[in-house]
Image (tube, grey):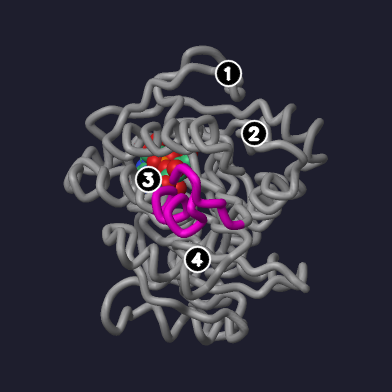
């Protein structure tokens, strides 16, 4: 019998790549979808026809219990969140409810449905739980590169909410013996990335400029540095973490850092243009508190899981520029369907 996985955040970049990866591994995949007539549902059905959808919302405890009861998954991947960092200053309470307390509600749902921690009742076989933690928890970094022991200093309501979710996942593992793990993923991108994030904003606008549809690209802090990898590589690590002998948290990244300035240079080079003629700094994109630099030390994931990033920064950004050129010229394949 193949395994069954439940994915929250199925309509996001990572949800779609993870679903495809698990289907390839022979899983039955169910995605949690919130809202009435969610506008993303048709896109998900078109891109992932073999994925079933179930109603539920990370804000609604009862709906998570009902989803677990009906799906009976072996593995739950919690990828649903408010994930755009600037939005977390505009809607900090919603971010905390979804990104911070959402995972708690899912852990509670697992505990209740499996009958864990309820005295004499014999628990049902456990459900493994994956929490999407983030390098944003390191924030104002306390040492570089960052590994699983590096202290957290989050710099946004989003980072604070993710730190809570990280600790509550660890606590449920220690309190109830749940196979509950967090992947501390550094920035991961793809042609399916939402255009609000800097990589995709850059690649989409580079493509528009190359095609004469745009004159300028306005960005915020060009000095920010990130460890950018390919989302398709990173979802494999999520799956590996739940197959490991023991539940542990893992840092997932490339170990290589680039600045936003490097990003625009590489993206413009892909279309043979000089970035300095097109990029303008616009303070409206500065953040109230910035995460200046991040770099992963993924040694534990390499040693224990045998995972490593397979895609270089140049390959990643090049593929995103190519995909946006194809999209704009109307020759995009199903793989590049706008999803995020
Ligand atoms: N979005 C955006 N737009 N970012 C800009 C811009 C701009 O115009 N100009 C400069 N930046 C800088 C930001 O200030 C930030 O330092 C960096 O580019 C990356 O921004 P994002 O792509 O928005 O990603 P993020 O690092 O804030 O967060 C992403 O990665 C995290 C993992 O570390 C998100 O995917 C988070 O959900 C994820 O947890």
Residue 120 in the image: state x and y as whole percent.
49, 46
Report which residue position mark 4 lands on: 207
Spatial CA span between label 2 and label 1: 12 Å
SS type, badge 4: helix
Nearest the eye: 45 or 274: 45
Q: Vertical placement of 248 versus 76: above or below?
A: above
- Residue 248 disc label: 2
Residue at the (54%, 66%) spot, across then down: 6
Frontmost of labels 2 and 1 is 2
Report which residue position mark 1 lands on: 149
Quadrant containing ligand 1: top left
Nearest the eye: 74 or 307: 74
Residue at the (53%, 81%) spot, across then down: 52
Frontmost of labels 3 and 4 is 3
Highlighted range, magenta = 106-124
If the image is split into quadrants, where does the C terminus sit? Answer: bottom left
SS type, badge 2: loop
**Which mark sits nearer the N-terminus, 4 or 2?**
4
Residue 50 in the image: state x and y as whole percent.
62, 83
SS type, badge 3: helix
**Which mark sits nearer the N-terminus, 1 or 4?**
1
- Residue 104 disc label: 3
- Mark 1 packing: few (<14 Cα in 10 Å), some, or many (20+)? few
If the image is split into quadrants, where does the N terminus sit? Answer: bottom right
């Amino acid at each position: 019998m193949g395994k069954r996985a439940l994915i929250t955040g199925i309509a996001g970049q990572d949800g779609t790549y993870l679903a495809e990866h698990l289907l390839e591994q022979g899983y039955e995949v169910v995605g949690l979808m919130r809202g009435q007539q969610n506008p993303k549902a048709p896109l998900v059905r078109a891109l992932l026809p073999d994925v079933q959808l179930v109603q539920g919302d990370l804000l609604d405890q009862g709906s998570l219990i009902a989803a677990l009861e009906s799906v009976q998954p072996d593995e739950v991947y919690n990828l649903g969140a408010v994930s755009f960092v600037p939005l977390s200053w505009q809607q900090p309470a919603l971010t905390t409810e979804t990104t911070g307390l959402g995972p708690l509600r899912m852990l509670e749902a697992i505990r209740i449905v499996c009958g864990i921690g309820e005295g004499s009742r014999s628990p049902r076989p456990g459900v493994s739980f994956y929490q999407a933690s983030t390098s944003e928890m390191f924030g104002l970094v306390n040492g570089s590169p960052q590994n699983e022991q590096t202290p957290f200093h989050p710099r946004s309501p989003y980072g604070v909410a993710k730190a809570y979710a990280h600790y509550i996942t660890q606590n449920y593992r220690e309190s109830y013996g749940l196979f509950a793990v967090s992947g501390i993923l550094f920035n991961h991108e793809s042609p399916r990335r939402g255009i609000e994030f800097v990589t995709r904003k850059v690649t989409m606008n580079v493509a528009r400029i190359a095609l004469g549809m745009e004159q300028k690209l306005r960005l915020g802090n060009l000095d920010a540095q990130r460890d950018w990898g390919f989302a398709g590589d990173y979802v494999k690590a999520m799956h590996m973490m739940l197959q490991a002998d023991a539940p542990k948290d893992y840092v997932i990244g490339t170990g290589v850092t680039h600045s936003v300035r490097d990003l625009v240079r590489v993206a413009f080079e892909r279309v043979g243009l000089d970035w300095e003629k097109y990029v303008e700094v616009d303070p409206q994109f500065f953040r109230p508190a910035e995460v200046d630099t991040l770099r992963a030390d993924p040694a534990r994931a390499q040693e224990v899981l045998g995972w490593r990033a397979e895609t270089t920064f140049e390959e990643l950004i090049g593929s995103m520029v190519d995909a946006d050129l194809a999209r704009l010229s109307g020759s995009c394949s199903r793989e590049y369907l706008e999803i995020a």
